[in-house]
Amino acid sequence: MAETTEEKQEQASPDIFVLIKEYIATRVELIRLTAIERATVVASNLITDTFVFLTGILTFLFASFALALWLGELTGSYAAGFGIMTLIYLALTLIVLFTKDKIVDGFLNDFLVKRIFKRKK
């Protein structure tokens, strides 16, 4: 007997629904795995960046003390050495304050955008 068009559609419909359900399940799993991957990348970057930041701050702090003590020995007064360091930091602060809009913000924006949207190699 020859099958009618309606009988063929009835047989194909369950297959289509099964395929659609499998497709949706696969897409949901892909989205879940992609979210997990992005979360782990963000977490690992946060941990390493925090470590680099803290070690950088400590290095800067100890270098500042060493330079202040060395300047204090050169001037014969530790207070003068720390005062010179204070003036150096004040000058750096003023430079950053007045060039912030032109130089610093643009550089930081570019750096952060590149960092956030960094592609895998």
Image (spheres, rainbow, N blue to C red):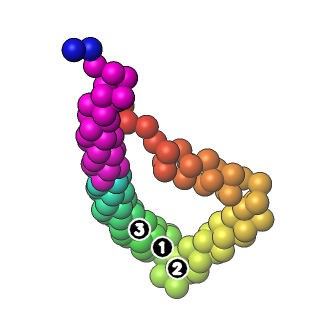
Residues under numbered marks 1 and 2 in contact, where contact means CB atoms less than 8 Å apart: yes
Principal secondary structure, stretch drawn in magenta: helix
Left or right, residue 33 beside residue 67: left
Secondary structure category for the residue under label 3: helix
Question: Along the line of sight, which residue is nearer the eye, 90 or 48?
Answer: 48
- Whole-angstrom CA distance, mark 1 to mark 3, is 16 Å
Q: Which residue is mark 3?
A: 57
Q: Quadrant of the N terminus?
A: top left
First of labels 3, 2 by sequence position:
3
**What's drawn in magenta, residue-wise?**
3-32
Q: Which mark is residue 78?
A: none
Residue that carries the numbered disc 1 in the rendered image: 68
Q: Which residue is mark 2?
A: 82
Mark 3 crowd level (few <14, some 14–19, many ≥20, 10 Å Cα): few
Q: Residues within 10 Å of mark 2 (few under 14, many from 20)?
A: some
Is 64 above or below relative to 121? below
Q: Amino acid at mark 1?
A: Ala
Give the image location of residue 22, x and y in percent.
Answer: 26, 41
**Which residue is located at x 53 percent, y 44 percent?**
114
Which type of secondary structure does the marked residue at label 2 adopt?
helix
> Mark 1 falls on what kind of element?
helix
Outermost residue to the bottom? 79
Nearer the camera: disc 3 or disc 2: 3
Considering the image in quadrants, where does the C terminus appear?
top left
Picture quadrant where residue 48 is located: bottom left
Residue 121 makes an appearance in the image: yes
Outermost residue, top side: 2
The residue under the point 37% across, 36% down is 120
Q: Amino acid at mark 3?
A: Ile
Kindly identify the amino acid type of the residue bearing the numbered disc 2. Answer: Phe
